[in-house]
Image (cartoon, rainbow, N blue to C red):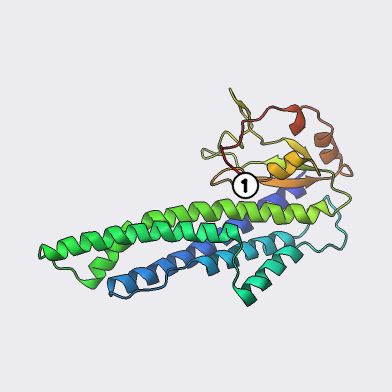
Amino acid sequence: MIGIEDARWIWRCAKKQETLESQWMKKFKERIQQYNIAIVKGENPVIDFTDILMEHFYNSSKQASADKQMPSVRLAKVKSLANWQKIWDYWKSKKKVPKKIKKHADEIKREYLKKTKQYTDRYSRDFREGKEFTQDFAIKKIEDLTDSSYARAKTIVRTETTNYYNKARKELYDQSTDVTHYLFLAIRDMATTKWCTEHRTPEGRGRHGLVYEKGDPLTERETPAIHWNCRSEMVPLTPLNPKHAELINDTLRQRKNNKCTPLPRGWE
C-alpha cells in the first residue's frame, strides 16, 4: 500500500510501542506485589501509581519523537517534545500531575483498593471461623483477587500508549512541509473493532486505510486512540512519494468522503 521501507518503519514503531507497554506492565505488577505483601503483613502502604504512569507516558512520547523518520518524509529541525518536557519538568519539581494522568492513576487505585477490601473482608471472616493461613497462602489469595486491577491497568496503559505515541508522532510530522496527509492504519486481527476495521457496518465503515488531511479538525479528533484498547496508528503521507500521492489522490479513500462508524459515546 505505501512501500516496503515505509511498511518496515511502521512495523518497527509498533514493536517499540509494544515493548514500552510490556515494560510498564512489569513495573506495575512489581508495585502491586509490593502492596499485596505489605497488606498481608498488616502494614498500611501509601497506594499510588502516578509516578510510573507519568514516566511511562513521557517515555512513550519521547520514543515516538526519537524514532528514525519515515523513509519517504524529510524533516526539518523541529522541537517535538518541548511541551511534554515542560510538563515532565514541572511535575518533577512541583509534583503537579496533569488531570488526565491523575484520573487514570485514581481509577487504577480505586480498582485495586476495591479488591483488597474484598480480600480483607474474606480473610477476617475466615479468621473468625478458625481457618488458618500461612503468609504465602494469604499473599497468593490477594494476588488472585487483584488480577482484575492488573487487567484494568493494562487497558488504560495500552490505550494511552497509543494515544501519546500517535500525538507525539503527529506533532513531529505536522511541522514538516513535506507532509500533507495522514493514513489511518489498524492492526487487523480478531480484536480489531468496528471503529478501526476496513469493513462496513450499518452505522458506517471503519477507518483502516482512510486518508486524513493535515490540519482538518477531523484529523485531530480521530487520531488514535479512538476507543479503549485501541492499537491503530496515524502515519504521515507526502505527495513527493508516488505511492503516497496515489493514496492522497484517491477520492474513495479520503475520510471526508466516507461515513464512518461513530466513535464510542463520550469518547474524547
Left or right of 222? Residue 132 is: left
Residue sitting nearer the eye, 130 or 17: 130
Q: Position of residue 182 (x, y in %)?
A: 77, 43
Q: Quadrant of the C terminus?
A: top right
Relative height, residue 179 to residue 110 (above, below): above
Residue sitting nearer the eye, 42 or 79: 42
Q: Position of residue 262 (x, y in %)?
A: 61, 32
Question: Which residue is drawn at the image coordinates 68% and 67% (left, top)?
Answer: 87
Residue sitting nearer the eye, 144 or 7: 144
Q: Quadrant of the N terminus?
A: top right
- Label 1: few (<14), some (14–19) or many (≥20) C-alpha neighbours in 10 Å: many
The answer to whether any part of residue 71 appears in the image is: no
The answer to whether any part of residue 107 appears in the image is: yes
Residue sitting nearer the eye, 11 or 98: 98
Question: Which residue is drawn at the image coordinates 83% and 50% (left, top)?
Answer: 72
Q: Quadrant of residue 164?
A: bottom right
Left or right of 149? Residue 51 is: right
Q: Quadrant of residue 130?
A: bottom left
Q: Which residue appears farthest toward the top when viewing the image?
A: 202
Question: Which residue is drawn at the image coordinates 24% and 72% (left, top)?
Answer: 135
Type of amino acid at the residue the image marks with label 1: Ala
Q: Position of residue 151 (x, y in %)?
A: 43, 53
Q: Position of residue 83 (x, y in %)?
A: 73, 63
Name the element at disc 1: loop
Relative height, residue 12 to residue 86 (above, below): above
* Location of mark 1 (residue): 225
Relative height, residue 127 to residue 152 (above, below): below
Question: Which residue is drawn at the image coordinates 85% and 38% (left, top)?
Answer: 245
